[in-house]
Amino acid sequence: MPTLIRFVILNVGVGFLLGAATAASIAIVAPGALGHGEGFDPLAFGLQVYAFGASFGLGALATALMMIAKD
């Protein structure tokens, strides 16, 4: 696999996992913060995981690109 593809997949994947873990931890600790009142809606939770994961993934990729040492 080319180095650039591996770099992008690794950093976006790690960021997505961090975002998904953040959404899950918020939903467990304070379900009212994400709009889960009395019940738990799996579709809403999936959309929230996707939203957190996409944001964190692109942020992790941007951070990794900025941290590359200049030659």
Image (tube, grey):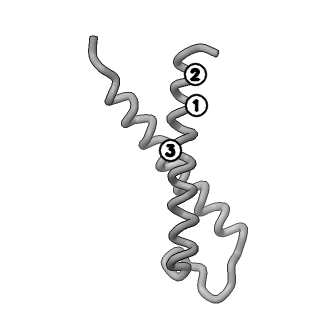
- How far apart in space, not on screen, are marks 3 and 1 (Cα)? 10 Å
For the residues labelled 2 and 3, say whether their Cβ atoms are less than 8 Å apart.
Answer: no
Q: Secondary structure at mark 2?
A: helix
Q: Residues within 10 Å of mark 3 (few under 14, many from 20)?
A: many
Residue at point 47%, 41% (across, down):
58
Q: Secondary structure at mark 1?
A: helix
Residue at point 71%, 67% (across, down):
43
Identify the disc placed on residue 31. Answer: none
Question: In the image, is 38 to the left or to the right of 14?
Answer: right
Q: Secondary structure at mark 3?
A: helix
Identify the disc placed on residue 5. Answer: 2
Under mark 1, the amino acid is Ile
- How far apart in space, not on screen, are marks 1 and 2 (Cα)? 6 Å
**Where is mark 1, residue-wise?**
9
List x then y, in percent, for residue 36.
Answer: 60, 80
Question: In the image, is 14 to the left or to the right of 65?
Answer: right
Q: Give the residue furthest to the right.
A: 42
Under mark 3, the amino acid is Gly
Q: Give the residue furthest to the top.
A: 71
Question: In the image, is 43 to the left or to the right of 34?
Answer: right
List x then y, in percent, for residue 37.
Answer: 60, 86
- The quarter of the image holding the N terminus is top right
Locate residue 24: give its quadrant: bottom right
For the residues labelled 1 and 2, say whether their Cβ atoms are less than 8 Å apart.
Answer: yes
- How far apart in space, not on screen, are marks 2 and 3 (Cα)? 15 Å
**Mark found first going from the N terminus, 3 or 1:** 1
List x then y, in percent, for residue 18.
Answer: 51, 51
**Where is mark 3, residue-wise?**
15
**Mark found first going from the N terminus, 2 or 3:** 2
Residue at point 27%, 10% (across, down):
71
